[in-house]
Image: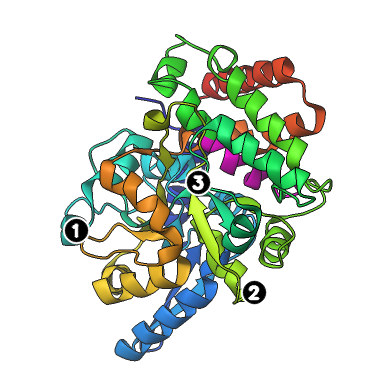
Amino acid sequence: MKKISVFILFVLLVGLFLTGCGGKQEAIDGRKIKLEFFQNKQEAVETYDYLIAKFEKENPDIDIEQNFVPESETVLRSRLAKNDIPEVMGLGGNAIYGELAKAGILASFSDDPKLKEVQESYIRMLQDLHGRVNNYGIPYTSNANTVLYNKDKFKELGLEIPKTWNEFIATAEKIKSAGETPFYLTFKDAWTAMIPWNSLAANLQGEDFIKQRIVGQTTFKERYDEVAKRLYSLLDYDHNDNFGMGYNQGNTAFAKGKAVMYLQGVWAIGSIEQANPDIKIGAFALPAVNNVSENKLVSGVDTVLTMSAKLDGKEAEAAKKFIHFLLEKENAQYYIDQERTFSTVKGVYQNNPMVDDLKPYFESGKIAAFPDHYYPSGMQVPNLVQEFLLNGDVGAFLDKLDNEWDKVYSRQ
């Protein structure tokens, strides 16, 4: 089991000290209980606004204040350093969630009856992040890491959904030859490069990469050469301003037909439709390998609902009441209908035809977890990938990944 991050442990100790000194933030104002809901999904702000209004109408004694900020994980780290822990949180199911859970910052949900209502595979996915059998949150939604495509343009160009890597590149070549832009890349926001990275890595890194890397039995240089080369090759089919455009600009550009394919997750569909309600979008798994039967869809916990371990009494009851409300089938269905994601709640299904091509992967279990969720967060892999895409030096990039991995682990 990995040791607790020194940074997180330091934050926890500072927090406990301040709490002992009477630093607990008062959250009760008069008769109403006020709780901050810190969440990391830019696309979901309006959806949460609706659900919060519904919750507050049913629970007039509780005020939920939604807080979304850009670079939310960076902001959260900064706040933790000041012992300013949000009461309720909607976080990504990634390494930071695992670190917070291991450090004791999150409340225990191990006895929560709602756990029985969500799919066990996603519970285990979260447990793998903190290495414990306990639960420090409840998985709310899952996602799919995809290639979004313009159905009208595919039809116009006579294209079929590619099933292999070679077919994928051949499709891009046909689009390029037709005078269209195959991919709209948005590498101004480093995290967007992780979309194709994760699809390629999950299918090409080999079995048990993380477990073997932890004990020093393999390296990025041994396993990720093809991942890096295939990622870099996508730049042959771009729009020539990859590092000047960010996520929001990409959503709008794809919505307006500036590219035929868009390397993004299903979470972007809602924003794209807002920019162009008439666009017909499809989604398929990036075919990272040439053996059709081996290609997997990357999916993970998009949002885990959790709360601060510092909460007690009426605040804790109110926070859990809000989390349980979001997990109710009707509300979970509303969320995924708006966000085009998938629910972890049993019996709640995504029925939008836009994601029909993804259903076989879920039905057959051809699902792989996001590789970057298991990298130590201190590695800052998105920034390293962005830097690599600017200079194209595969060898130096893989050496840097290994060096950063070793450096981060040596501090733990």
Disc number for residue 363? none
Circle nearer the viewer, 3 or 1: 1
Report helix, strand or loop for mark 1.
loop
Task: Write down the residue under mark 2.
Answer: 276
Disc 3 residue crowd, few under 14, some 14–19, many 20+, Cα 10 Å: some
Disc 1 residue crowd, few under 14, some 14–19, many 20+, Cα 10 Å: few
- Residue 340, percent across and down? 45, 64
Looking at the rendering, which quadrant does residue 103 occupy?
top left
Q: Relative to 297, say whether 283 is above or below.
A: below
The CA distance from mark 3 to mark 1 is: 28 Å
Report helix, strand or loop for mark 2.
loop
- Residue 308, percent across and down? 38, 58
Task: Write down the residue under mark 3.
Answer: 14
Report helix, strand or loop for mark 3.
helix
The N terminus lies in quadrant: top left
The reply to whether dot 3 and dot 1 touch (C-beta < 8 Å) is no
Circle nearer the viewer, 2 or 1: 2
